[in-house]
Amino acid sequence: MNWNTWIRQFHRWLSIIFTAVVAAIFVTLGLGVEPAYWVYLMPLIPLALLMLSGLYLFALPYATRWRSGRRTASEV
């Protein structure tokens, strides 16, 4: 599997995990159960990883364009 494909899959699965954790917190609040304080911090781990992988995926087209433009300039 390609490195970029692996990052994309990782990002997709992280988004599912993040959404499930946040939804579970809202469901418990809707049921009237007050979760422990550390439960509110649980979404921060996938959120931080989502930020890193999202920034990589955001910069990927620009880096590819920069590398291809630089390569053609050095060949001339």
Image: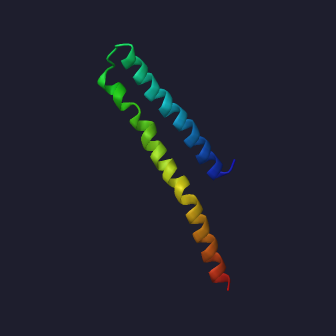
For this rendering, which residue is in front, 34 or 64?
A: 34
Q: Is residue 11 above or below residue 43?
A: below
Q: Is residue 47 above or below residue 62?
A: above
Which residue is most to the front? 30
For this rendering, which residue is in front, 67 or 31?
A: 31
User: What's the residue at 56%, 64% (across, down)?
Assistant: 62
Among the 4 quarters of the image, the one containing residue 60: bottom right
Residue 71: image location, x then y, percent: 64, 76
Q: Quadrant of the C terminus?
A: bottom right
Q: Quick check: 6 left or right of 20?
A: right
Residue 27: image location, x then y, percent: 43, 19
User: What's the residue at 39%, 37% (across, down)?
Assistant: 44
Residue 70: image location, x then y, percent: 60, 76
Q: Is residue 51 above or below residue 68?
A: above
User: What's the residue at 55%, 42% (across, down)?
Assistant: 11
User: What's the residue at 61%, 42% (across, down)?
Assistant: 9
Q: Quick check: 10 left or right of 76?
A: left
Which residue is most to the left? 37
Q: Which color scheme does this rendered protein use?
A: rainbow
Residue 52: image location, x then y, percent: 47, 49
What is the count of numbered marks?
Answer: 0
Which residue is most to the right? 1
